[in-house]
Amino acid sequence: MSPSPRLPVSVCMISGAEAHRIGRALESVSGWAGEIVVVLNQDVADGTEELAQSLGAKVYREAWKGHVAQKNSAAQKATQPWILGLDADEVVSAGLQAEFRKLLDGSLGAGNCAAYQFPRLTQYLGRWIRHGDWYPDFQLRLWQRGAAQWGGIDPHDRLEVRGSIGRLRGDLLHYSMESLEHQVQKMLRYADDFARLRAGQGRRVGYLDLLTRPAWRFLRSYVLKLGFLDGWQGLCIAWTTAFYTFLRYARARELQSGGD
């Protein structure tokens, strides 16, 4: 039986020192993608470049320009008709790959949209999370070359599409939170980004923001979106989401009060 032909898709990634996990992401696309482009930070020396090249990627060394500019740089190097944006901690599932193939050979019947989004399924503390605020977590990542570009404010990039957007059903697998420590460090970093953005916009934080927003996020995640069905991990996500919400607004209030 002859192997299936490669799809006309350029997988575009940006990467820092990711040798410990980028291999899983690359292996999930190396057998079917027409091209893999990795823009690697200039100072990386942990073997990421050699690993990516061994799995068929074209690697370009560039100084870090921020998430948005770095992702646009990777997409500009693509040569295939379609582009798939992929992070080093993500894996294209077999189901999503099969859906890509049906879409691009015209047998899916999903129309000819400029871009497509699909659900992202996250593994957290040993469990796949299927409820709460973390699922389906739709990601807009597949687009026709020339029909979109990355925008947003670093580090929260957003794909800006010129044209219609379709939806697929296969899961993009996400291995994001390596530990609670990693999660807390990420929350602290993002809280500072949120506070600076809000201060720059001149938007003020009141006492009610600190009181009600965290409570609402817990209620929405754990009860309304059925986070309790994800066991103790679902409870952990609801509490940490509520704490992260409090932290963001508390940090913004601190800056607002001249505390930094």
Image: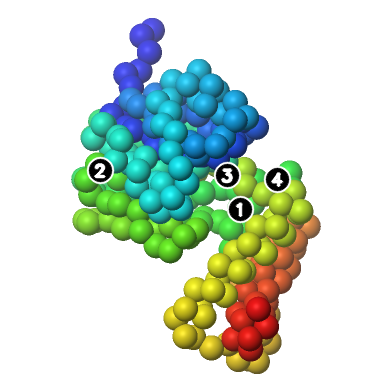
Q: In which quarter of the image is the N terminus?
A: top left
Decide if residue 192 is on the left or right side of residue 55. Answer: right
What residue type is disc 3 on? His
Q: How far apart are the two marked residues, 1 and 4, measured between alpha carbons?
A: 18 Å
Report the residue marked by disc 1.
Answer: 130
Q: Quadrant of residue 218?
A: bottom right
Report the residue marked by disc 3.
Answer: 174
Report the residue marked by disc 2.
Answer: 144
Report the residue marked by disc 4.
Answer: 178
Q: How far apart are the two marked residues, 2 and 3, measured between alpha carbons?
A: 23 Å
Relative to the observer, which residue lies in front, 3 or 67?
Answer: 67
Q: In which quarter of the image is the C terminus?
A: bottom right
Q: Which x, y percent locates residue 189?
A: 63, 62
Marked residue nearer the N-terminal end (1 or 2): 1
What secondary structure is marked by label 2? strand
Q: How far apart are the two marked residues, 2 and 4, measured between alpha carbons?
A: 32 Å
What residue type is disc 4 on? Glu
Q: For the residue carrying disc 2, how many other residues have a C-alpha within 10 Å: few (<14), some (14-19), or many (20+)?
A: many
Q: Quadrant of residue 90?
A: top right
Marked residue nearer the N-terminal end (2 or 3): 2
* Residue located at (40% from left, 26% from top): 58
Q: Which of marks 1 and 2 is in front?
A: 2
* Residue located at (59% from left, 37% from top): 17
